[in-house]
Image (spheres, rainbow, N blue to C red):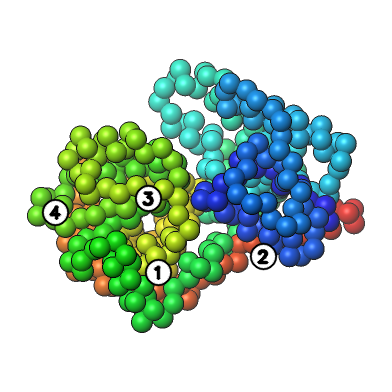
Amino acid sequence: MKLAFLIYQYFPFGGQQRDFMRILMRCRQAGHQLRVYSLRWEGEVPHGVELIKVPVKAWSRHTLYQRYSQWVAKALLQNPVDAVIGFSKMPGLDFYYAADPCFAERMAQEKSWLKKMLPRYRHFLCYEQAVFAPPSPTQVMLLSPQQRQDFAKWYPGCEHRLHELAPGIDASRLPGTDEELAEERKQFRKNFSLTDDQIVLLQIGSGFRVKGVDRSIRAVASLPEHIKQQVQFFIVGQDKADKYIQLAQSLGVAERCHFTGGRDDVPQFLRGCDLLLHPAHSESAGYTLLEAVINGLPVLTTDTCGYAFHVLRANAGEVCSSPFSQQELNSRLLAMLESDQKTQWHKNGLAYAHSVDVVGMPDSALALIENTVRNKERQ
């Protein structure tokens, strides 16, 4: 099959981007011809993939995305494919990988009527409707039960087009034996000059605002002094850190907050730290949560993350409720650090890794694409 993949920008450290690459590589392994349309690409282009950089520009993001989708639509008319797979909501998709939460649900919770009148908000709602509202035929790959609930609520009749995929954890993130985990923890602590009695907190994710890095910094700053003196907080991800460093300085915890940038050795952090903080504002899935759980790293997150249900099912941490309260996050962080449940959370997470399919996403995505296209050809 000839397949076109549409992604606005690719860089190696984004969750959406990693999923895109996993599905792309699985389709290549299956022998399909692959073409990618992207505005911006960082890193190497895989062998056997044709990359087309879409030559459009605009001052605003929503106008840029409109020009992108219009340009790609014309290009596909001239050089058609068997299926178009998009990683953002836009018209003309055969398949949409739901890396983003339901925009209509987010709009309903928005208190500012002025924001709802802005062109960018109308754009994102219109592009979501192009995927989910009748008579769209787009097949949707979901990441969590929460997405199914929200999309079905706002777009009745789309339920038969919603397909929940298994997680797609990379093999490098899977845990080894207890002995290997202990050795990796020891090596991590050595590499970063950390002692065994220090409390090492971790946050992973590009896009610091959406991930709630400011919330995490405030929670660290709220800890009692005798605990705070033991804490080191690592923030791993690709984004501009300046204002978060300033926040940490203003709260007196700058020397405890370490912004590492995007890294390829994330498994090291998962196995060397003591707790994952992930108080995101909104997250369709949040692979980091599941990666932490299956590596025995206790998690403190928010219920607005699609994969928060894995934390609860595994009994491997705690989940803050909506609407978000900074005081609740602060209290739960302190309680978890003082809890005698840490060892049990660790064991529960490792056991959960053997009870669910955590790697099957690329295979299930490929099967959906192939079966849908073949059924369409038979009609």
SS category of the residue bearing label 4: loop
Amino acid type at mark 3 = Thr
C-alpha span from label 2 to label 1: 23 Å
Identify which residue, 86 or 254, lies in the foreground: 254
**Residue under pointer 3:** 260
Q: N-terminal of the two: label 3 or label 2?
A: 3
Q: Is residue 363 visible to us here?
A: yes
Residue occupying image coordinates x 68% and y 60%: 25
The location of residue 143, given as percent across then percent down, is 55, 54
SS category of the residue bearing label 3: strand
Q: Is residue 278 above or below residue 239?
A: below
Q: N-terminal of the two: label 2 or label 1?
A: 1
Checking the image for residue 229, the label placed there is 4
Mark 2, Cα crowd under 10 Å, few <14 / some 14-19 / many 20+, is: some
Q: N-terminal of the two: label 2 or label 4?
A: 4
Q: Are marks 3 and 4 in contact (CB under 8 Å)?
A: no
Mark 3, Cα crowd under 10 Å, few <14 / some 14-19 / many 20+, is: few
C-alpha span from label 3 to label 2: 32 Å
Residue occupying image coordinates x 27% and y 34%: 246
**Residue under pointer 2:** 363
Checking the image for residue 295, the label placed there is 1
